[in-house]
Amino acid sequence: MPATYEPIATTTLGSAASTITFSSISSSYTDLKLVMVHNLATSDGFIDINFNSDTGTNYSSTRIRANGSTVDSGRDTSATKIREINSFQNFLAMTEMDLFSYAGSTNKTVLLRTSSDDNDVATYIAIRYVVGLWRQTSAITSITLTGINSQIATGTTATLYGILKA
């Protein structure tokens, strides 16, 4: 990572877990970046994102996905989470999430990219881009990632970086 990226915390799961949480996030950075290599333990599904334990209808997202033969898009409004990280049982995916002005006093914008490749079984080769919004003005102090349809698998690694002013 560039010199302006400072690792805040890294989690590598030694056993499957329902959630990964980064808490007590300092407000001393301009932005945050989460990098995760992941899969799910028992079935395909999603990894949901919540900030500051907020499960109110304060999230929106717009997405586009391509898998080599089809492209689709969609939108969620007034959702209780951002459900945009595809995750699968039998192969790894990589997700990068950028949180802009996470400590500012305006709504929080998220840019999310997930890519996956299941060794040429075209069903799950995919790229997914998402723009998300958390309609709250408080600083993000915690991020919770929750496995849906399955626990997050052993070996999943997630690193949260703080981006320093250049």
Image (cartoon, helix red, strand yellow):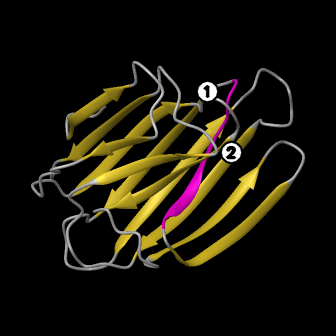
Disc 2: which residue: 127
| Residue 137 falls left or right of residue 13 | left
Residue positioned 34% across, 68% down in the render: 54
Q: For numbered disc 1, what is the local secondary structure?
A: loop
Q: Image quarter for residue 129?
A: bottom right
Disc 1: which residue: 92
Find the magenta span and give its range. 81-90
Callout 1, which amino acid? Leu
The picture places residue 40, in percent across and down from the top left corner, at 59, 33
Callout 2, which amino acid? Ile
Quarter in which the N terminus is drawn: top left
Q: Image quarter for residue 117?
A: top right
| Residue 16 falls left or right of residue 92 | left
Q: For numbered disc 2, what is the local secondary structure?
A: strand
| Residue 103 falls left or right of residue 155 | left
As for residue 43 lying within the magenta part, the answer is: no
The picture places residue 21, in percent across and down from the top left corner, at 32, 44
Residue positioned 64% across, 45% down in the render: 149
